Each structure stands twice: as structure tokens, then as C-alpha cells.
Amino acid sequence: MGQTKRKAVFTAEPTQLDQIQAVVRSGKYRSASEFLREAIGEKLRRLRQERLEAQVASYCAEGYGDEDRVLAESQAFVRRNTHATG
């Protein structure tokens, strides 16, 4: 994380802002900014995963997947737990 943070302005529905503020008040996050950083990070991870899955599906649709189906399934379709436990 050691990067310098930059400020940004965003627009959201009032109900979304109310829900974010409620989560912050519950103590789950220290601020709306912290919540939004995590939400944005999660969305970006999902987009990367979806893009990878689409690329693998295209690869397999071209017939290349039959050559290494087990490898493709084990590496591309296994979702890793992104939340640390402990």
C-alpha cells in the first residue's frame, strides 16, 4: 500500500451514501473513504477475474482447451479466497 493517496470526488445515490455512513457508524470502517477504497479494490479484482475467465473461455472455444483442460480448469476457474483470515 505505500503509495500516496489522491483525492477524488464521486456522485452516488443518497440511499447509497446513507448505507455507507451506516456501515461506518457501525465501526466496520473508520471512514467512508476507507469503505470506498475497499469497494473499488474488490470491483477491480472481480473485473480482472471476469476478463481472465472470458479469455480462457475464448481460448477453449477455439479448441485449444482440449489440449490442456485440466490445467486451464485448475488455474483459471478456481476462485481464490481474497480475504485474509487470522
Image: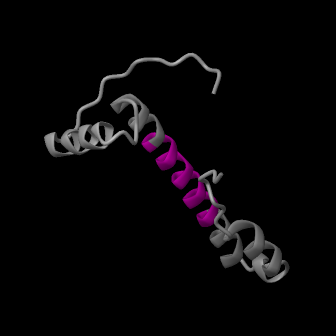
Q: Quadrant of the N terminus?
A: top right
Q: Residue at left 65%, top 51%?
A: 86
**What is the basis of the colouring in this image?**
one colour
Q: Point out the stretch of residues depicted in magenta.
A: 39-54
Residue 47 in the magenta stretch? The answer is yes
Give the camera-side residue of 78 and 19: 19
Residue farthest along the left direction in this orientation:
14
Above or below, 27 against 76 in this view is above
Q: Residue at left 63%, top 54%?
A: 85
Q: Residue at left 40%, top 37%?
A: 29
Give the camera-side residue of 69 and 74: 74
Residue 70 in the magenta stretch? The answer is no
Task: Name which quarter of the figure residue 70 lies in.
Answer: bottom right
Q: Position of residue 2 (x, y in %)?
A: 65, 21
Q: Position of residue 61 (x, y in %)?
A: 66, 78
- Left or right side of 68 for 19: left
- Left or right side of 18 for 8: right
Mainly helix, strand or loop, the magenta region? helix
Give the camera-side residue of 55 and 71: 71
Above or below, 33 against 15 in this view is above
Q: Position of residue 47 (x, y in %)?
A: 52, 53
Query: How many labels, in total?
Result: 0
Q: Residue at left 36%, top 29%?
A: 31
Give the camera-side residue of 52 and 81: 81
Task: Name which quarter of the figure residue 72 lies in.
Answer: bottom right
Residue farthest along the right direction in this orientation:
67
Above or below, 69 against 22 in this view is below
Residue farthest along the bottom direction in this orientation:
66
